[in-house]
Structure formats: structure tokens, C-alpha cells
Amino acid sequence: MTFEDLKLKRQFLDAVEALGYRLPTPIQSQAIPRILSGKDLIGVAQTGTGKTAAFGLPLLDHLDTEWGHVQALVLAPTRELGQQIAEQLEKFAKHKKGLRTVAVYGGANIATQIAQLKKPCHVVIATPGRLIDLAKRKAVKLDRIRHLVLDEADEMLNMGFKEELDEILSFTPEDKCTWLFSATMPREIRRMVGQYMTDPLEVKVNQSATVNKNIEHR
Ligand code: AMP
């Protein structure tokens, strides 16, 4: 299967080509068509499998830059992962004019993040604790979110973000799409899936599907 077969728009095909991706990874082949169709998905996959592009490319395809409000929220456990996701999304959106993403996380100046969120922005990438803080200060509005990504969901629970996740999900509309990625599926994640997701398709990839970062493909 090629990226063309996955029915991504030309601008994203050009972006992945510029990044040197030749063929979709297993999680990308399985997740991209499902996410493009606007249905819920669980991706049992760890870092290194290409999961960021698996949700990032079809997520960007859904966004309408004519609307200046936050349409997508990506939650990640750590500041480092949040920054990596933001960097990758910007590369994938190289040809999507006017798209603006903002990454917010703890341990950084909140006033700067509030100022960033005042300008029109389409995707917010956040760690749960900082997002709650910003929502309580009314610096970010989550009531018009259409797409939600929970990345490394098991790690967010391991870091003690269970209550924060429930609170954030309560701020978002019910009729959104939810795409959850997790390396493992403990009982608490199954509970969240049952509570917040609608008829999700579950796709699994194993460690051997990891893209080795030290190999250059020619
Ligand atoms: P991730 O699992 O999203 O952290 O991605 C792991 C690494 O694989 C990142 O450096 C990506 O840029 C790279 N990558 C993602 N998809 C592909 C692909 N289809 N072909 C080659 N490299 C990829």
C-alpha cells in the first residue's frame, strides 16, 4: 500500500515525500483511512511506529482554516512529546495555508501561552494539567472541538492524569471524533474507551513495526 492509496490530499502526499517517507508504516495504513472517515479509533502502538503521522496527516485533512477557532485537541503526557507532535504537525501542514498550531505544557510561562492562544488557532497540543489551568482561566475554549487525540494514553494515566482527563473530556462536545493511542490497554483505558468513544475500531501493531531511526531508506 502507498500513501496515494490511503486517499490523502495532494498537499499531504507532497509533505510526506519531502520528509522522505516512502511507504506508510502498518499503523499508518490501518489508521489513516479510518480517521479520514471520521470514525473513532484505538491504535495500540508505541513511539517509533509512525503513530504521529498516523493521526496527524488525516487530522490535518479534516481541519478548515477558514474557521479561526480550536477544532482539534491533542493530549500528550509530557512536554517533550507535545513539542515533538507540534513540530511534526507543522511539517505535515507545510502546504496547508493559514493553519496554526499551539503547544501548551507545564513548566513554561503561562502568560506567553495565553497570548499565543489569543490569536486564531486550529490545533492545540497540550499536557493535561496545563490545559486545565488554561481552561479555568478561560484562555482556551474546548466547546467546539471536533477532533480529539489522546496520545500515549497509558502514560497519561501512569503520570496520575486520570482526573484531569475526565475533566477535560467533560469540557468537550459529545459529537466529536476520538482517536486514542496507547502502547498498552489497561483496565482504566478500557473504561475510558467505554465511556467516551463510539464504536471504535481497534488496530494493533507490534514492536517489530518500529521505524528504525538510524536507517536511511534509499
Ligand atoms: P513516531 O512513532 O510518530 O514517533 O515516529 C517515529 C519516526 O518515524 C519519526 O522520526 C518519523 O518521522 C518517522 N516516520 C514516520 N512515518 C514514517 C514512514 N512512513 N516512513 C519513514 N519514516 C517514518
Image (cartoon, grey):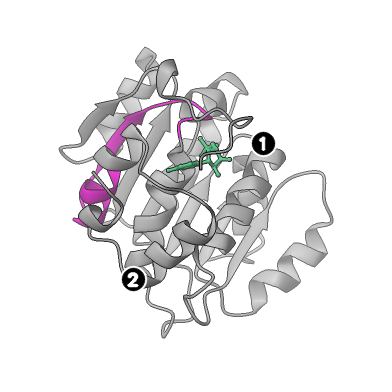
Rendered location of residue 49, percent (x, y): 45, 31
Q: Residue 111, image x and y in percent?
A: 81, 64
Seen at 38% across and 63% down, the residue is 13
Q: Kindly indicate the quadrant of the structure image that contains residue 115.
A: bottom right
Which residue is denoted by mark 1 in the rendering? 78
Q: On screen, 128 above or below 33? A: above
Is residue 187 shown above or below 135? above
In the picture of the structure, the residue carrying the numbered disc 2 is 10
| Residue 205 against residue 70 in the figure, above or below | above
For mark 1, give the secondary structure.
Answer: loop
**Looking at this view, is 19 or 114 the one in front?**
19
Is 53 situated left or right of 3 in this image? right
Q: State the residue at coordinates (37%, 77%).
A: 64
Task: Determine if the magenta segment contains residue 47.
Answer: yes
Task: Residue 6 in the image: state x and y as whole percent.
Answer: 24, 53
Q: Which span is picked out in magenta? A: 31-49
Tell me the crowding category of disc 2: few under 14, some 14 to 19, or many 20 or more residues within 10 angstroms, Cα based. Answer: few
Query: Which image quadrant: the N terminus?
Result: top left
Give the residue type at disc 1. Thr
Residue 27 percent across, percent down from the top left = 34, 35
Q: Give left or right: position of 93 versus 2.
A: right
